[in-house]
Image (cartoon, grey):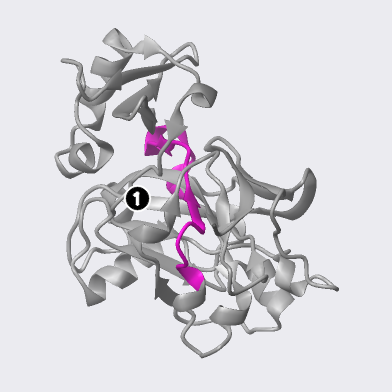
Amino acid sequence: MRFLSFLSNGQKGLAAVDADGQLRGVLANEAAYPGDLETLIANDGLAAAYEAIVASGAAISIDDVEVLPVLSNPPKIFCLGINYKDHAAEAGIELPDYPTIFSRYSTSLIGHNTPIIRPKISDQLDYEGELVVVVGKGGRHISEGDALDHVAGYSVFNDGTLRDYQLKTTQWNVGKTFDGTGSFGPYLVTPEELPKGAAGLSIETRLNGTVVQKSNTDQLIFDAAKVISLMSEAMTLEAGDVFVMGTPSGVGHFHQPPLYMKPGDICEVEIEKIGLLSNGIADEA
């Protein structure tokens, strides 16, 4: 199953891709609207919602609606740093024994085709194409063997990063959660459509059509099952929690000279079998 959250004429809606590849949507003011993805995930309602939308939803185009982040207000957003082997090599860092975790906040989230915002106070806006894992069933002390049973689906993320603010301190948080820098979507893709744990999928970032990152999710140091299990040792995971799984090599910061995003650019992140996430770049008003 494949879902998309959207706005049409100011009205919230939910869409699904049918067996023929057609996107079908239902608006919140229509009887068939099953609720938003946050509610459906929390109540194990994705399968029933999919059937309802496919049966009665109107055909829509992704280019004719305002695409929202897959989840606009997740309970927790966990981001992983240095979680691809090739990126660790690029940064000159030994493979870690424990994941580097930092947080993003929902105020930073935007959807497909919405501009990523370069703030007034920095011109070091970098791209980071990433896999997203969305928790469907919460819990504490989840074993690694059971962890993938807790996954609702997968998506794509561009973890727009202000490098100067990231590197002001050893804590990366501020540079990683500026408003309008975290693009998330366009689709939530449920696990049965993908290899186990979304392993073995190509991931590619393109800036103005030029490939700047090209890797594979097999390069992950800590995979979805491992990260879910480790984080559940520390805290109770909740339905709708989001794991942004880190970026491969090729980030702009390590180009010579550095390659940062600027207004007018188009940045695309594509993950095999999950989708293409595209955003322009604009200056803060």
> Is 237 situated above or below 155?
below
Q: How many labels does the image show?
A: 1
The quarter in which the C terminus is drawn is bottom right
**Local crowd size for mark 1, using a 10 Å CA cut-off: few (<14), some (14–19), many (≥20):** many
Q: In which quarter of the image is residue 94?
A: bottom right
Q: In the displayed image of the protein, which residue is found farthest to the bottom?
A: 169
Q: Position of residue 154 (x, y in %)?
A: 42, 44
Q: Does the magenta stretch include residue 191?
A: yes
> Is 4 situated above or below 248?
above
Q: Position of residue 123 (x, y in %)?
A: 67, 70
Magenta stretch in the rendered image = 176-197
Q: In the displayed image of the protein, which residue is found farthest to the front?
A: 285
Q: Residue at left 44%, top 16%?
A: 60
Q: Residue at left 58%, top 74%?
A: 121
Q: Position of residue 49 (x, y in %)?
A: 23, 24
Q: Residue at left 20%, top 16%?
A: 30
Nearest the eye: 237 or 264: 264
The secondary structure type at the circle numbered 1 is strand
> Is 239 situated above or below 260?
above
Nearest the eye: 167 or 275: 167
Is residue 73 toward the left or the right of residue 248 in the image?
Answer: left
Q: Is residue 113 magenta?
A: no
- According to the picture, the residue beneath numbered tag 1 turns out to be 134
**Can residue 95 be seen at all in this image of the molecule?**
no
Nearest the eye: 122 or 20: 122
Nearest the eye: 130 or 13: 13
Q: Residue at left 24%, top 74%?
A: 233
Q: In the displayed image of the protein, which residue is found farthest to the right?
A: 256
Is residue 154 toward the left or the right of residue 63 in the image?
Answer: left
Mark 1 belongs to which amino acid? Val
